[in-house]
Amino acid sequence: MNKFYRHSVLSLLIVALFAVYGCSSDNGSNGAASGTSSGASGASQAAEPAADNLATELRFPLAQQVPTLDPHLALNTNVYVTLNIFEGLFAFDENFNPVPMLAESYDLSEDGKTYTFHLRQGVKFHNGKEMKAEDVVASLNRWKTLTGRAQASLGDSEFTIKDDYTVELALAEPRNDILSQLSHVLNNAAILPKEVVEAAGADGVTEYIGTGPFKFVEWKQDQYVHLAKFDDYRSVDAAPSGLSGKKEVFLQDVIFDIVPDSATRFASFLAGTYDYVDLTLDNLPQVQGLSDVTVDKILGSDINLVFNKKSPLFSNVKYREAVAAVLDDDEILLGTVSSPDLYRLNPSYMYPENTTWYSEAGQDNYNQKNPDKAKQLLQEAGYNGEEVTLLTTKELGGSFYNATIVVQKELEAIGVKTKLDITDFATLLKKRADPNAWDIYVGLFTMPSTPSQLLYLNPTYGFADDAKLAELNKALTAAVTPEEIKAANDALQQYEWEYLAAVKIGDTYSQRATRSKLTGLVTLAGYPNLANVKLSK
């Protein structure tokens, strides 16, 4: 008979296996006006406003259209909204440790294969129904069918009901990434009422009912999404951190305005419509001298060049090696963010702050800047002027496009014939899933907390269908001790720099401006937690 170990809220944070994202020296906040800071998460800090001086409505600008409010399908800008409506069993703290939210605790069997989740009791959905195991099981079994990284981790395993407040997950093999998968912000493993899940169609759920601090009110396409305070919200009793911990709601209404034009967003900030806005280098000087504005620099996304391993050319590793050899990562990063202060070189597929999973294995193949080697590899591969399609979009602030045109220039310089396929982001996602539609895709990726969340190591994303890669991924997720994890992690990254499912370019930062009247705003990888936010009148 297997022994079970009860993991309390406090003891969970102690388990080294899941301490996947080590603290940086500066965690993304700066109380001085017009100062800068860097880090994965950030919180606005200023003097606390008096209770009778609090505004009840916050307007928050979004840089992109909202295609869905289904949390299991949500990517990019829609996550800004959904993370404030929905919650999961676990959520990341500011250091990307998974922390219980709707789960009170969990048990892990001695063989590492069976997770038993104990649910908090008395948690209500926005429709007044109490959350129970049937809702959790329906939600998570749907989530795992819609999310590639969840499918890779869970396989055919399903969540099952033990009793009204207990859910079990029995895996075929031990895996060390389950809690991180349940905490990830993209395609979030959110819990919805069973009946909402069962009524969902191919386009997603039609009712947006969660357990979060804000409830859905109205979505006016291409204009705004309106949320309101959920008066019956049941918070956990733990210190707030990242997307986890205590959530106390001081706002009555939040309006997410859809404002794709960056100049319009910034002008509205200057006019006082918004108290928070993303910054470009061009408008940075206009806020640096304002005494009531803080400027923060936030570590947010990394840039990777992904190959279509089913394309006629890049199914051959020699062609992938040629591209890796020619890339000048400084040039690509500078062309993307326009300032050396807003990027850093990094040979690892994980961030240096992530002390458990960071590795420098294979770094000799990083940032080679060697066009002669690239030309030689093209010759060895038999290149004969075939056209290479680079898939990109001008949406999302132009970052994808800017990075891609620099890559295009570098490829053309060694004689590779290229063409750009420029689409809207929704079309790009559809084309990226088609092995006949593209050759190279350069994109920005939300930081992962474990290597198993690296999409391009998955057969369904760029078609990295390689037996050795799958074997190394399996060994990595089964590792237990720090020594085993390091050895398996180094082996995986070393092979990835040889197999080249993707080429790491570097890490990027973004900048934001926050007025001093807005306090308590926390972001994680750029995504906002609007609980605990106060806004002075």
Image (spheres, rainbow, N blue to C red):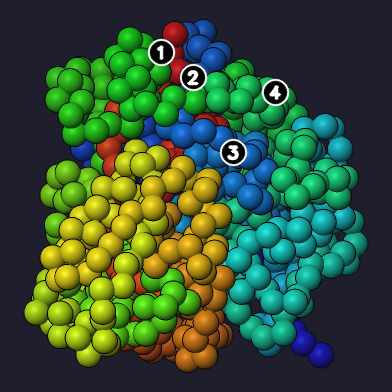
User: Do the residues under discs 4 and 2 have CB atoms within 8 angstroms?
Assistant: no
Q: Is residue 103 left or right of residue 318?
A: right
Name the amino acid, label 2.
Arg
Q: Secondary structure at mark 1?
A: loop
Task: Name the residue rendered at 77%, 62% in the picture.
Answer: 141
Name the amino acid, label 3.
Pro
Q: Badge 1 is on which residue?
A: 273
- Please state which of residues 177 and 240 is positioned toward the viewer in this rendering: 177
Task: Name the residue rendered at 84%, 67% in the picture.
Answer: 160
Q: Position of residue 74 (x, y in %)?
A: 59, 47
- Disc 2 versus disc 3: distance between alpha carbons? 20 Å
Q: Secondary structure at mark 4?
A: strand
Q: Badge 2 is on which residue?
A: 59
Task: Tell me if residue 352 comes above or below residue 513 in the rendering.
Answer: below
Name the amino acid, label 1.
Thr
The quadrant of the rendering that contains the N terminus is bottom right
